[in-house]
Amino acid sequence: MKIYGINCGYNITGPVKSRDVQGYQSSGTSSLVRQPVFDTVSFKAASLPKLFINDLREIPDLVCGCCGKRMLQNDAVNRFMNEKIYYPAGIALKRIKTEKIFNESKASKEMKHAYSYLKEYCAKHPKLTMNDILTKRAVKEARKKLSPEGSEAFDEIRELTKLIAHKSKYVIDEIVKLNPDFRKVEKKVFKELQWLAKKYPNETFHTILNRPEIHGFYLKNLEAKQMDILNKIEFASETLEPEVKPLVEEAVINARKIFKEEEPSIRHKRSRVIAEFQNALEKSNNHASVQKITEMAESLPSSVTDADAFMIKGSQKSSNTIIETLLGRQRNTFEHVKPHHRIGDNGPSNIYNYIGLCGKCNLERQRIGYDIFTKTHPEMIKNEQLQMDKIIYFINSGILTGYDKYPEEIRKALLVESKNAIDIDISKLNLEQARMKRKMRQSLYIETKKALEGQNKIFKFGRSYFYKKRH
Ligand SMILES: [Zn+2]
């Protein structure tokens, strides 16, 4: 069995970094997202927090520079997945065998090797998740020595362990606590999942979405939308030249076949259908009709734009991948202002070329220049300003470090990339205040550390401690 991650365009299952900023964490992930109380510093038992943020993806409640929705901190999503969603690798590995997801006697020798290597590894590190393990240097080195198939087997085992998932009710309850600011499609998806979890609380989402009646329901909805668009395209093809019209009609017939007759597990149906229409339209000189039909074809539902399509695609994925994808779209990700993969003119990968976009907007923008992108996403001009205002607030407060030159550099980069469409105001930046506040936080930190060491016991400071101190 092969299960693929939903293609997000960025690495959602990637390394989980321990570069945590705990200064605003009272307890658990949910409070971390909900209550960023940075003016107060609550200390976690026995460990001193880092006082500074040095990564804009870790700024609490930062709004997406494009859609303006509140994003989840990058690390918060990693922590949530590790602590609440994935099982420790040892348990997951054992269960894929006992639950007959992985049949060792019938497996290839590469799979057998990967399984036994991983099992041995997690016997020594029982708390790690599969993602943790696959980012360890020793494991990476071991994989490099193997054949491509041998190395790939590690990923395949990981995908299998993702089927070892929590029950739907538990997952929903945890996401509710995390409280993401879902965008429209994701909100709809989440509501559907909530409803399903109510109906089948003790099953995993993979099982639920593969129930014939559930799968059939979403597939019927999806097909109705697809057929509706195909009918419209057929109708619109009347306006095309006589030699082009039959080509489009043929593409419509093929598209119906692809959507209705092909196995659900066959991928890229939508993009293949769109390509068929593009080919059919190539010889037409009727630009208005070509544009109209192209737009119609591109409006075919995808798992990014449509909840029913998400459910159908989700049914092909593991339960944990469904959750990863859903939360990944709310995650604060680095967006290259000047696109990274622009042929011959790569944008650099450093903070002076990064703004924070939610996973979903990052996916939508791709390599389009902001002069064009802001025409379809005019809200970006306002939202990028809101984001910068918050970043400046965090610089001025002495919390965000290493970003002193950021506002000016990003302002310039955005002006160039958007051909002056995005001109942000950075006049609130006050670097003198920032330096002063940083010093204050540093000395407060040292003072607290001494106090902790002096009394040799665990402190739990709440809001009131620093409130008293400052007044
Ligand atoms: Zn966004």
Image (cartoon, rainbow, N blue to C red):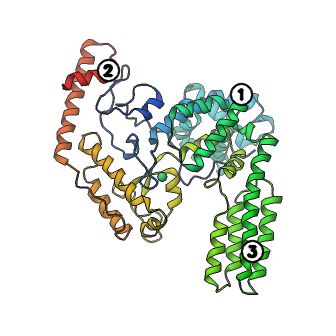
Quarter containing the N terminus: top right
Of circles 3 and 1, the one toward us is 3
Instruction: Name the residue beneath numbered marker 2.
Output: 461
Q: Decide which of 298, 148 is in the foreground and name it.
A: 298
Residue 16 pos. (x, y %): 49, 39
Alpha carbon separation for disc pair 2 and 3: 68 Å
Instruction: Name the residue beneath numbered marker 1.
Output: 202
Q: Residues within 10 Å of mark 1 (few under 14, many from 20)?
A: some
Q: Residues within 10 Å of mark 2 (few under 14, many from 20)?
A: some
Say which element carries label 3: helix
Seen in the image, is 204 located left or right of residue 15?
right
Q: Say what amino acid the circle numbered 1 marks.
A: Asn
Quarter containing the C terminus: top left
Say which element carries label 2: loop
Q: Decide which of 390, 154 is in the foreground and name it.
A: 390
Say which element carries label 1: loop
Alpha carbon separation for disc pair 2 and 1: 39 Å
Seen in the image, is 384 located left or right of residue 165?
left
Q: Earlier in the sequence, mark 3 or mark 1?
A: 1
Q: Is mark 3 within 8 Å of ligand 1?
A: no
Residue drawn 61% across the image and 82% down it:
287
